[in-house]
Amino acid sequence: MSVNTAKQEAQAIVEEFSFFDDWEDRYQLLIDQGRKLGDFPAQYRDDDHRLRGCQSVVYFATERQADNRIVFMAESDAAIVQGLVALLLRVYSGREASEIRDTEADFLTEIGLDSHLSATRKNGLASMLGAIKAAAG
């Protein structure tokens, strides 16, 4: 579990991406982030856990821990989407619901993703953010 707050983790992501001026390098960093994700539990790889609104296949699951923290698990069959998943999980997974609700996804705009993602990827990202916020609702 991270010792950083969600906002500190989001700021760390902004700093990591700011090292690269070229978008090819930023995409590679995004893909590398996705490769670092742990294995997705097989029991959640079903239609009930498939996230709607995504062009690629995205499975998404939540587990509420005894200490009231919410753990998110997700995976995608597309490398860039898997990277987006990894960023969202870094910021939001393992947090209490109030911290999840209080942390906006501004870091995605700060690293420039809003202007470099296709409309369908933006929709999928919005769906995943919606699912995260709903789980913390």
Image (cartoon, helix red, strand yellow):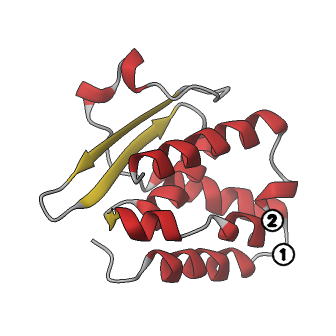
Tell me where residue 103 sits by quadrant: bottom right
| Total marks placed | 2
Q: Label 2's element?
A: loop
Of 21 and 63, nearer the camera is 63
Q: In this view, does 78 lie above or below 97?
A: above
| Mark 2 neighbour class, 10 Å CA radius: few under 14, some 14 to 19, many 20 or more | some
Amino acid type, label 1: Asp
Q: Residue at x 36, y 49 (%)?
A: 72
Q: Earlier in the sequence, mark 2 or mark 1?
A: 1
The image's mark for residue 21 is 1
The image's mark for residue 112 is 2
| Mark 1 neighbour class, 10 Å CA radius: few under 14, some 14 to 19, many 20 or more | few
Where does the image place residue 99, in percent across and percent down from the top left? 42, 71
The answer to whether 14 appears left or right of 94 in the picture is right
Q: Which residue is drawn at 55% across and 26% down?
A: 57
Where does the image place residue 137, in percent across and percent down from the top left? 42, 51
Q: Label 1's element?
A: loop
Of 22 and 69, nearer the camera is 69
